[in-house]
């Protein structure tokens, strides 16, 4: 396996482990807490992080000669990530945290299987990235694919920060504080950072 890919996969695994522990620790009241400045509640962010890998795996797999199951939520045409995320989250409104994490594990395995087969050529090519286009109002920008992978690798702590805006009392907990302090943004291209909210 490409050593650059190994680093991304290790980072994905590290943050997934932390996120699972955090998600399981959330009370029913915390899960129902609205996120300031967002139309989502804490539970919606958990559902988003547990479903998004299905879409990513379906997109990455053909690049390396694999076939991942299509996401349960159909991909809209023309494609709109915000609409897809909204439908995926809405479709999980009755799922428990454990059910969400079980689903997440299947999607993550498919995504990692595709990433494991990537080469320097995959990592170094440039792609157009639109990110959270509706929320930022920015047009897509050209970024290096390997940089986008690093953005995906820190997706869980990124949205855990969103959750902590609604649950500020949790920020000082040692495991959470250390996790948040350990996140490395240095490998994420500016074009990816500015497109995320």
Image (cartoon, rainbow, N blue to C red):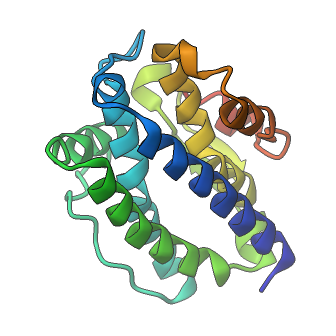
At x 67%, y 45%, the residue is 142
> Residue 75 appears at what percent x and percent y?
25, 57
Quick one: 6 or 141, which is closer to the camera? 6
Quick one: 73 or 136, which is closer to the camera? 73
At x 79%, y 32%, the residue is 181
> Residue 69 appears at what percent x and percent y?
31, 78
Above/below status of 139 relative to 58: above
With 106 as the anchor, is 84 left or right in this view? left
Above/below status of 194 relative to 146: above
Above/below status of 147 relative to 172: below
At x 14%, y 45%, the residue is 94
> Residue 73 appears at what percent x and percent y?
20, 57
At x 47%, y 80%, the residue is 62
With 109 as the anchor, is 145 left or right in this view? right
Residue furthest top in the image: 37
* Quadrant of the image occupied by residue 4: bottom right
* Quadrant of the image occupied by residue 58: bottom left
* Quadrant of the image occupied by residue 115: bottom right
> Residue 150 appears at what percent x and percent y?
71, 52
With 197 as the anchor, is 94 left or right in this view? left
Q: Quadrant of the N terminus?
A: bottom right
Quick one: 146 or 162, which is closer to the camera? 162
């Amino acid at each position: 396996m490409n050593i650059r890919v190994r680093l991304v996969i290790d980072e994905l695994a590290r943050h997934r482990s932390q996120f699972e522990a955090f998600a399981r620790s959330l009370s029913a009241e915390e899960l129902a807490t609205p996120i300031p400045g967002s139309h989502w509640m804490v539970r919606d962010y958990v559902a988003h992080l547990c479903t998004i890998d299905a879409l990513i795996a379906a997109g990455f797999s053909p690049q390396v000669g694999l076939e991942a199951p299509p996401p349960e939520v159909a991909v809209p045409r023309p494609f709109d990530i915000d609409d897809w995320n909204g439908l995926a989250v809405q479709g999980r409104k009755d799922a428990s945290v454990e059910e969400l994490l079980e689903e997440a594990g299947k999607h993550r395995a498919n995504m990692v299987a595709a990433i494991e087969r990537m080469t320097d050529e995959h990592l170094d090519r440039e792609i157009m990235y639109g990110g959270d286009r509706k929320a930022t109002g920015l047009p897509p920008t050209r970024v290096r694919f390997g940089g986008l992978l690093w953005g995906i690798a820190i997706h869980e702590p990124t949205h855990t920060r969103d959750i902590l805006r609604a649950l500020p009392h949790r920020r000082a907990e040692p495991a959470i504080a250390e996790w948040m302090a350990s996140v490395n943004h240095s490998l994420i291209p500016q074009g990816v950072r500015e497109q995320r909210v």
